[in-house]
Structures are given as C-alpha cells and as structure tokens.
Image (cartoon, rainbow, N blue to C red):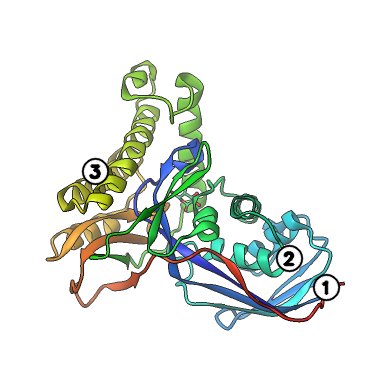
C-alpha cells in the first residue's frame, strides 16, 4: 500500500506573473489531498467520497482532456506525463474545498504522481504536474500551484522566481494569520479568459522582451492600450512580491496593506480578472477591524480572496472562511510492502 499527501496553496501576492517568469509568494496550506492505494494492474482506479463517479484511467491514456468524469482528467494528465509501469487501485480524500481557488487540482495531481511512484526533486514533480494540468484542463497555467504544493515549508511563504525557479522560504510572522474567504462565485470563464490574458502578455513580450526584466518605461512602445495595461500589471505585481516579502519580514502592517491593496486594484483595473463579487468582498474585509490587508487570490474570475489578519480577528459571520497555516509540501506518508512489479 502507498499513501501520499499533497497540500493546496494560497497565493499571498504575485498573481498572473508566473507564466511570464515573474515573482510569486504562495504558501502551501494545511488543507490538502491524500491518495491511498495498492499499486498494480493496468489502470489507475480511484474513488472519492465527494465524487459520484470514479476516475478509471488506463495507463495508455493519451488524451487526458477527453476523459470523464471531469476530475479524472487531472489523474489522466499525471498518468500520461508520468507513464507509470503499474496502475493503482485506491481512494482519494481531501480537506480542500474543490474549485474554490486553493489549487485542489494541483494537490490531486501531486498526490497522484507520488502515489504512482514519482521519485525526484520537488521542482521536477511540479514541472510534471504543471504539464499534467495543462493537458487536463487546456489552460496554459504557470508553475506556481504545483511548485507551492510540492515545495511547501511549514510556517513560511515561498518567494518563487519563475524565471530561475529559485524557491526562497520567507518566514511568516507568528502574530499574523492568513484567512482565505470564498466569494461563493465559481470560476466560469476561467479557461478562455486565462488563456486570453496569457496571450496578451506574450504580445507584450514580443515587443519589449521578457516582462520580468522590463520596466514601466519600456511600455511606452506598446501601441495597444489593453496589452500595455496587462504588461503594467505584471511589472508592478513583480515589484509588489518583494514589497510584501519585506513587509512580512519586518512586520510592517501599513506596507502589507498597501502591497495587497495595490495588487487587488491592479488585478481589477489593469489585468481585469476581478469580479464585482470579489471587489465587494475585498472591500468588506478591508473594513473589518483586525484585517491588515486583503486581495483576490489565484486566477480570479470568482474564487477566493486572501486576507492577512491580526490574531483573534472576527470576520463577519456570513462569510465562508478558512484560517490556514503555512505547511510542508507533498510527501509519501506510508509505503508498505513491495507491491510494485
Ligand atoms: C492559476 C494558475 C497559476 C497562476 C494563477 C494566477 O492558479 O494555475 O499558474 O497563474 O492562476 O496567479
């Protein structure tokens, strides 16, 4: 038997920057996904108590996006990328809210890859699972979600440079808590809109070179006003990642607030991935006593906001919120017997 665990993630700042090699500051969280199973056979057969249909994926799968039910696509993406020599029969259990923006799909991919026998570095695990996610969902996503899940460090956020893939743990202040708050809005247009935004960034990069190296002055040569705003978001957001990392290191509340507020405005106005629901939620959070800063987190178009709050902060009772802790990354929990052929 093998039992593998992978955490979800919340991104503190640095959204829609990873796919242009930018900076991000996610943390792995203490909610995640466990895959328990018996290796063997020629299919991966996983059941989940929250899914009516099992994921039954042959080892020969070559079109993960065509697999049903939908959750099985992520399993299929991993099978197609990893090409394991033996299948697995088992169960998936998760403490993550599914589809809420806490990377439940990345956690599933990473846990499945480990359970299917992936052994290697956190970075290689993340790369494999990023490709799996892209093939499963058709979204040209970056590496943040899978790398945060694979490389998490307890009590730390991760400052990831998505150009060099250098991961630097940033200690979280002991007296600041992280709360994820659900907008209740499920992400509907995320697939096409995410790809559109990524394409806008590519247009900008063709004109000015890597956005990671560009500065705002370079943008004057961009004639398309929309492309210019997309690029402006990426460049300013990269700067805010280090501003928030520095503010966390020094415990500087006003700087934490400003970095998060500016990030939300930029995602709303320049990158246009917020929604009226998310804007209203962030406004309510900012108006709540004890909240240091708040912003939408992840891809946007619905999903969740993240807030940094003082200990013992009471959020409005009608909000669906999870207090999360920075956790260690994915790992094998148990491996018993030698069932692999
Ligand atoms: C999704 C993607 C990530 C990242 C975020 C936005 O979660 O999977 O790669 O681009 O959106 O920051």
N-terminal label among 2 and 1: 2
Residue that mark 2 sits on? 117
Report the side of 59 relative to 163 (left or right).
Answer: right
Dot 1: element:
loop
- Quarter of the image holding residue 79? bottom right
Query: Mark 3 and 2 residues: CB-CB less than 8 Å, in contact?
Result: no
Label 2 and label 1: CA atoms lie apart by 9 Å
Residue at the bottom extreme of this rendering: 49
Q: Is residue 91 above or below residue 28?
A: below
Quarter of the image for the N terminus: give it: bottom right
Marker disc for residue 217: none
Q: Is residue 177 above or below residue 334?
A: above
Report the side of 78 relative to 265 (left or right).
Answer: right
Residue at the top extreme of this rendering: 221
Residue located 47% across and 19% down the image: 207
Badge 3 density bin: few <14, some 14–19, many ≥20, Cα 10 Å: some
Query: How far across and down, in percent of the image, does residue 241 sit?
Result: 34, 43
Label 3 and label 2: CA atoms lie apart by 43 Å
Report the side of 142 relative to 281 (left or right).
Answer: right
Res. 249 visible in picture:
yes
Res. 300 visible in picture:
no
Query: How far across and down, in percent of the image, does residue 312 sit?
Result: 19, 74
Residue that mark 1 sits on? 340
Residue located 34% across and 31% down the image: 232
For the residue with label 3, is its CB less than 8 Å from the closest atom of ligand 1?
no
Marker disc for residue 262: 3
Quarter of the image for the C terminus: give it: bottom right
Dot 2: element:
loop
Of residues 182 and 340, the one nearer the viewer is 340
N-terminal label among 3 and 2: 2
Label 1 and label 3: CA atoms lie apart by 51 Å
N-terminal label among 1 and 3: 3
């Amino acid at each position: 038997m093998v039992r593998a665990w992978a955490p979800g993630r919340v991104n503190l700042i640095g959204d829609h920057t990873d796919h242009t090699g930018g900076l991000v500051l996610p943390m792995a969280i203490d909610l995640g996904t466990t895959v328990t199973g018996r290796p063997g056979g020629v299919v991966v057969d996983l059941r989940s108590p929250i899914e009516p249909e099992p994921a039954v994926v042959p080892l020969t799968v070559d079109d993960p996006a065509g697999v049903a039910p939908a959750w099985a696509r992520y399993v299929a993406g991993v099978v197609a990328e990893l090409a394991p020599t033996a299948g697995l029969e088992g169960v998936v259990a998760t403490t993550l809210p599914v589809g809420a923006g806490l990377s439940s799909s990345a956690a599933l991919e990473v846990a499945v890859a480990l359970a299917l026998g992936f052994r290697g570095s956190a970075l290689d695990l993340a790369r494999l699972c990023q490709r799996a996610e892209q093939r499963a969902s058709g979204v040209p996503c970056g590496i943040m979600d899978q790398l945060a899940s694979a490389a998490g460090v307890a009590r730390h956020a991760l400052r990831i440079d998505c150009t060099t893939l250098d991961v630097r743990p940033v200690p979280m202040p002991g007296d600041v808590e992280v709360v994820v708050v659900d907008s209740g809005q499920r992400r509907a247009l995320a697939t096409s809109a995410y790809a559109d935004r990524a394409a806008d960034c590519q247009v900008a990069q063709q004109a000015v070179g890597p956005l990671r190296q560009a500065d705002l002055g370079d943008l004057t040569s961009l004639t398309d006003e929309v492309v210019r705003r997309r690029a402006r978001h990426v460049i300013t957001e990269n700067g805010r990642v280090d501003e928030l990392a520095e503010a966390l290191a020094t415990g500087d509340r006003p700087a934490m607030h400003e970095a998060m507020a500016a990030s939300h405005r930029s995602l709303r106005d320049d990158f246009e991935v917020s929604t009226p629901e998310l804007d209203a939620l962030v406004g309510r959070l900012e108006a709540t006593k004890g909240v240091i800063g708040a912003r939408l987190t992840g891809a946007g178009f619905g999903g969740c906001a993240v807030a940094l709050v003082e200990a013992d902060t009471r959020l409005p009772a009608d909000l669906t919120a999870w207090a999360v802790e920075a956790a260690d990354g994915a790992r094998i929990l148990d491996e018993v017997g030698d069932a692999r052929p």
